[in-house]
Image: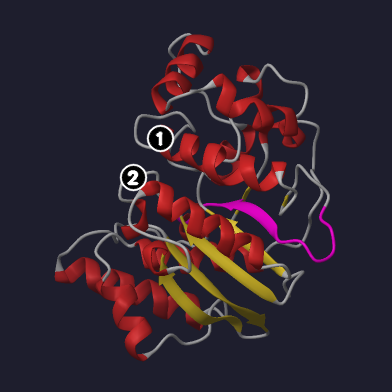
Amino acid sequence: MSLRAKIAGVDFSGARDAGRHIWVAQGTHGPNGFQIDSLKRADKLHGGGVTIDEAMRGLRDCLSGLTESIIGLDFPFSIPATLIEQFTWSEFIHDFSRSYATPEEFRDDCRVKAKGKELKRATDSEAKVPWSAYNLRIYRQTWVGIRYILAPLISENRVRVIPTQTPREGMPILAETCPASFLKHEGLYSPYKGRTPDLQKTRSSILAEITKRNYLMPVTGKTRRRVVEDVGGDALDAIIAAVCATRIDDLAPRSVLERLEARVYF
């Protein structure tokens, strides 16, 4: 059973038209899994829009309003400890925008410190995440997520982030999740992003299987069509991020390293 009854999942994007790619699934958790009450793109959130600035503003307001929820977001909340100069994760997040004015500065600095290697956090290896936090495919997503979501929400004391911060009553709990890690753990991973009928069938099959395993209440009608027909698989990823959040049963860091590198929940 989830530590909180209210659950949300976010499939994140750092694209310039992020509002078209970020999805937010909201609902509740019960004995038969996650019940979807709302599934929206960021451009449909209150105060949201298509551009990255609009999408980030709408998403921040949405997240801070989910005061009784655990929320899974699928972007890296930190980087390998050997690349962090600050003593604490909170200091790293606080200094992030000043340290890295652009996504490219962030990636270049990580690569210089790592001597060209793509290092992973301990939690990345445990969760079998596909890429390093500064890999060419996701470095922009990492930078945007930390700079425009975590940093402002933490500085304004609007959320708490596990396992690096202690949760507080009446404040949203944010957790890093990885849909691909969940699917691998469950033996369900196969390519599901794309336009072909076979890939649509795979998205439908994943929905059916996680429902069968009592992670998700049945998804039907218009909501199911939206998930299956979403060629990027983003709507499905938001649902799986929420499912990951329902599985969280411990909030404290398991090691000193997690206090700095954070943790992928899957």
Q: Residues within 10 Å of mark 1 (few under 14, many from 20)?
A: many
Q: How many marks?
A: 2
Q: What is the CA distance from the residue labelled 1 to the residue labelled 2? A: 8 Å
Question: What residue do we see at 29% from left, 61% from top?
Answer: 192
Q: Residue furthest left?
A: 196
Compared to 185, does 230 lie above or below? below
Kindly identify the amino acid type of the residue bearing the numbered disc 1.
Answer: Arg
172 falls in the magenta region: yes
On the picture, is 250 further left or further right than 38?
Answer: right
Kindly identify the amino acid type of the residue bearing the numbered disc 2.
Answer: Ala
Q: Tell me which label, 1 or 2, sits earlier in the chain.
A: 2
Mark 1, secondary structure of its residue: helix
Q: Which mark is residue 114?
A: none
Mark 2, secondary structure of its residue: loop
**Residue 146 location (% of width, % of height):** 56, 39
For label 1, the residue is 140
Camera-nearest residue between 63 and 211: 63
Which quarter of the figure has residue 105? top left
Do residues under tags 1 and 2 come within 8 Å of each other at their CB atoms?
yes
**Residue 174 location (% of width, % of height):** 66, 55
Instruction: Please give the range of residues in magenta.
Output: 167-180
**Residue 42 location (% of width, % of height):** 41, 62
**Residue 128 location (% of width, % of height):** 51, 43
Question: What residue do we see at 42% from left, 32% from top?
Answer: 139
262 falls in the magenta region: no
Question: What residue do we see at 36% from left, 51% from top?
Answer: 18
For label 2, the residue is 15
